[in-house]
Image (spheres, rainbow, N blue to C red):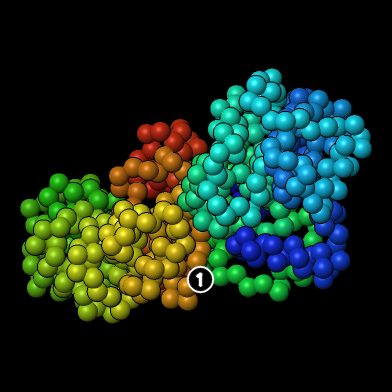
Amino acid sequence: MINDKYLPLPLYRANQVRELDRIAIEEIGIPGICLMERAGSAAFEILKSHWPKAHRIIVVCGTGNNAGDAYVLARLAHLAAYDVMVLQVGDTANLKGDALIAFKAMQAIGLTAQVFTKTKLSVVDVIIDGLFGTGLNREVSGKWQKVIDSLNSRTCPLLSLDIPSGLDADTGTVLGAAVKADVTVTFIALKQGLLTGAAPDYCGKLYFDDLQVPPIIYDSLTTTIKRLDYHNLKTALPKRQRTAHKGKFGHVLIIGGDSGMIGAARLAAEAAARVGAGLISIATRSAHAALLNLTRPEIMSHGVETAEQLQPLLEKANVIAIGPGLGQTSWATSLLEAIKETEKPVIVDADALNLLAKTPFRFTNSILTPHPREAARLLESSIIESNRFSTIRALQRRFGGVCLLKGAGTLVADSQESIGICNAGNPGMATAGMGDLLTGVIAGLIAQGLTPIEATNLGVCLHAKAGDKAAAQEGERGLIPSDLIPWLRHYANP
């Protein structure tokens, strides 16, 4: 769960955060130990607010600056009459700089560190993870892995400082083993790896504290990666005039719905309508075209068996979405080939992506929407989730246009290689048809005049927020795409 309200939008790599630390210390003149004190204090406040009845805490420390934050928290908790046990992993002789100062300050009040053993975790209210920080760049193994395994077998809540130990701050991948936190509080800047990859399963509820550094320190670094924010993005939706008519809001054409898969095209079409597109057409198999009008008469459904029959529909459309329920038959291939030269915006999804992977080419104005397996086919690579940022950049370079990579922490990239991350959404959305719905949402937004990048950024956020709202009603398990449709309309009317 992400605490969106207090998270900044810019995202940074680990080396950039270290540079921000350096600027704060060397150029602004904030002593490093002061920042460490603020970090430990901020984490202690989170601990108190989340677990107000907690009394016995265990603080697990490594030998880097992350341990320094943990020593500060341990000292503050001890002074506040908590029952505190500090468990040390690694030799304290390796401590240096501010972490060593924090360690000695803790010792000065009579609190000592004990050697970590799993048996000491038996009776505790909350565990603090201060093993590794964002500087970790190798696989966790040996005794460190065993410690993390012990922490993950706990029966109490756990708070991670800055990042769950073992998680890569740049990619969100697990470096051999990683702590699964209930709450993570991160400092100075929001690390890009905390919002995608495996991170959502490891961070728990995410908080941010800037440690009171002056805003000017962020001016010296440029980041092209930002968190997508629905509240900012929704301003791109034009206000409707009283004299408006359906022609003002575009004509969406959905191509798909082969035998047995007409529901996919239907979902995409209704999503486009529910976010405000003026006209919606579906090009599908003749045998079942009429069936779509029975359940949603507002949608114009056309039987199309050849590329020639598709041409009149292409001429009328402002935006084209191909792929939902398309299949990979010769019929599907011929329809994809028929739109190959169009200059109109084309959202490419599902089986259209699989066909594109077999015979790669670039559309003039495309939005590609793969999930990781589809991305692997498009890039002819099995290494997709190990670095989702590299993956989406590779997709954009190869196919041009706008690309999004679905999953927890959906990524969006455009021709400028800027990347947006949508951190909304939930596991209940991992079900068939959700991607078809998203395709329709993006198409419906483009139809209303948004640029492809505006529509994709807003579309993934709108879709995710609708999923979260629907899940909040009756839970994540059993959530289906149709449950989102009323909420798509809700969030398309900000």
Residue 4 seen in render: yes
The residue shown at (61%, 52%) is: 136
The residue shown at (63%, 73%) is: 222
Answer with the quarter of the image where residue 191 lies.
bottom right
Return the residue at label 1: 418
The residue shown at (9%, 62%) is: 330
Q: Nearer the viewer, residue 242 or 33?
A: 33
Residue 412 at x, y percent in the picture: 45, 64
The residue shown at (89%, 42%) is: 105
Q: Residue furthest top?
A: 123
Can you say whether 246 is above or below 365 in the image? above
Residue 10 at x, y percent in the picture: 62, 63
SS type, badge 1: loop
Answer with the quarter of the image where residue 277 lies.
bottom left
**Left or right of 118 in this view: 71:** right
Residue 16 at x, y percent in the picture: 65, 65
Q: Nearer the viewer, residue 421 or 163?
A: 163
Answer with the quarter of the image where residue 150 lies.
top right
Can you say whether 427 is above or below 96 in the image? above
The type of residue carrying mark 1 is Ser
**Left or right of 297 in this view: 302:** left
Q: Quadrant of the N terminus?
A: top right
Residue 163 at x, y percent in the picture: 63, 48
